[in-house]
């Protein structure tokens, strides 16, 4: 998994009815875009995360419809 500041980290809900959580990666703490990441969520919560298999990185700066999702 590789990310840069400004990318989105999407954590998929793990149980039925649980919504996905989308946060903005504000700092990459690993080398060459590798985890862990400091993530800011819209509810004001900040977390340092080493994403697991339930997470994907979205690159919103790319053209709409051509965004790449890395797992």
Image (spheres, grey):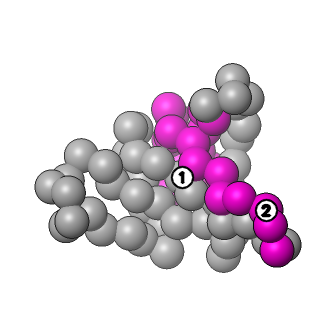
Marker disc for residue 9: 1
Residue at horizontal 40 percent and vertical 38 percent from the top: 5
Disc 1 crowd, CA 10 A, few/some/many (<14, 14-19, 20+): many
Residue 35, image x and y in percent? 57, 54
Report x, y in % for residue 9. 54, 52
- Please report the residue visible at 31 percent of the width from the left and 49 percent of the height from the top: 60
Residue 23 appears in the rendering:
yes
Residue 32 visible in the picture: no
The answer to whether residue 39 is left or right of residue 66 is right
Upstream in sequence: badge 2 or badge 1: 1
Residue 27 is situated, as x and y percent measured from the top left of the image, at 51, 34
- Residue located farthest toward the top when viewing the structure as drawn: 44
> Is 64 in the magenta?
no
Q: Quadrant of residue 6?
A: top left
- Residue 28 lies, with reference to residue 26, above or below; the image says below
From this viewpoint, which residue is outermost toward the right?
A: 15
The image shows residue 61, relative to residue 38, as above or below, that is: below
Q: Which residue is mark 2?
A: 18
Q: Secondary structure at mark 1?
A: strand
Q: Which residues are magenta?
A: 16-41
**Left or right: 17, with 27 as reference point:** right
Which of 15 and 40 lies nearest the eye of the viewer? 15
Q: Residue at x 26, y 63 (%)?
A: 67
Q: Which mark is residue 56?
A: none
Q: Residue at x 61, y 66 (%)?
A: 55
């Amino acid at each position: 998994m590789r990310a840069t500041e400004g990318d989105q980290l999407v954590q998929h809900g793990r149980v039925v009815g649980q919504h996905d959580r989308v946060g903005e990666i504000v700092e990459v703490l690993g080398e060459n875009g590798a985890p862990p990441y400091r993530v800011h969520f819209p509810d004001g919560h900040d977390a340092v995360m080493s994403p697991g298999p339930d997470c994907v990185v979205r690159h919103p700066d790319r053209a709409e419809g051509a965004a790449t999702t890395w797992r």
